[in-house]
Amino acid sequence: MTKINQHSGKLIVFSAPSGSGKTTIVRHLLKQEELNLKFSISATNREPRGEEKHSKDYYFMSFKEFKQHIKDEDFLEWEEVYRDSFYGTLKEEVHRIWSLGKHVIFDIDVSGGLRIKRKFPERTIAIFVKPPSIDELKRRLKDRSTESEDKINMRIAKASAELATAPQFDHIILNDHLENALEEAEDVVADFIKIPLRRDEEEEE
Ligand code: ADP
Ligand code: 5GP
C-alpha cells in the first residue's frame, strides 16, 4: 500500500443540504480505522453550538481574524455559507493531516466541496448526501433541535439550490435508511482510497 503523505494523500468531500445526515456519515467513517481518515477542522466565525469545542469541531474565530486569513490567502476555499456566517478550509489543516499519514475527510457546503474537487480533481472524491425529501429534511432539523426556527428556515431555503448541484458530484448517496447509507459510504470511500494517483499532483493552491 502507498504510504500516505503530501503527494499521495486523498481528499474525501461530503457535501449536502444541512440536515441530510452528512455529519452522521462522516463520524461513522472516522471510526473505521482501516480507512485512515482524519477530519478537516474548518475555521468559522459562527458561535460554538452545544458541546462544540475549539480545535475539535471548528477553529472558532472572530470575523476580523477570518478576514485576515482571507487576505493572507490561507484558505484552500472559503464561503459565506449563511448570511454573516463564514466557513473555510485552511491550507495548513490539509497539510497537517497528510503529514500525519492520513487522508482528509471534509464536511463542507456544496460550493466549497466542488471548489476542492476543481482544485484537486484527481485526488478528490466529492460525495453528495441526498435526503429523501425537503419535508424529511425539515423533520430532521427540527428533531436535531440545535437551531432556532429562523435558522432552520434559512437552511431549508437554501436546500433546493443545493440539491440542484448533486449531478456535479462524483457520487450521490441517498440517505433514507441510515444503515444502507453508512454501508454505501464505507464502500465508496474504501474503493477510492485504493486507487493510486496517476501522477504526483502539484496543483495550484
Ligand atoms: P448534517 O450534518 O447534514 O446537517 P446530521 O448528520 O446532523 O446532518 O443529521 C441531521 C439529523 O438527522 C440528526 O439528528 C441525525 O441523527 C438525523 N439523521 C441522519 N440520518 C438519518 C436517517 N437516515 N434517518 C433519520 N434521521 C437521520
Ligand atoms: P454548521 O453551522 O451546521 O456547522 O455548518 C453549516 C454549513 O457550513 C454546513 O453545510 C457545513 O458543511 C458547512 N461548512 C463547514 N465547514 C466548511 C468549510 O470549511 N467550507 C465550506 N465551504 N463550508 C463549510
Image (spheres, rainbow, N blue to C red):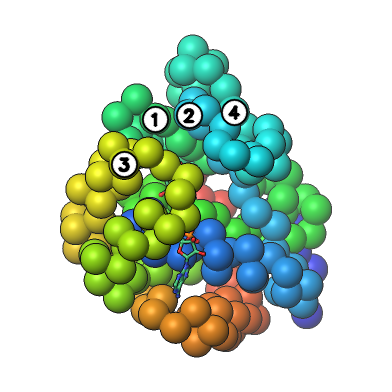
Query: What residue do we see at 37% from left, 38% from top?
Result: 148
Q: Residues within 10 Å of mark 2 (few under 14, many from 20)?
A: some
Query: What amino acid is found at the position of numbered circle 3 in the picture?
Result: Glu
- Per the rendering, the mark at residue 46 is 2
Q: Residue furthest top?
A: 64
Cα gap from disc 4 to disc 1, whole angstroms: 11 Å
Q: Earlier in the sequence, mark 2 or mark 4?
A: 2
- Is label 2 within 8 A of ligand 2 (CB to nearest ligand atom)? yes
Q: Is residue 167 above or below residue 109?
A: below
| Foreground: disc 3 or disc 1 | 3
Looking at the rendered structure, the kind of residue marked 1 is: Ser
Tell me the SS state at disc 2. Answer: loop
**What residue is disc 4 on?**
60
Point out the frontmost of discs 4 and 3.
3
Disc 3 or 2, which lies upstream in sequence?
2
The residues tagged by marks 2 and 4 sit, at their Cα atoms, a distance apart of 7 Å
The residue under the point 46% across, 36% down is: 87
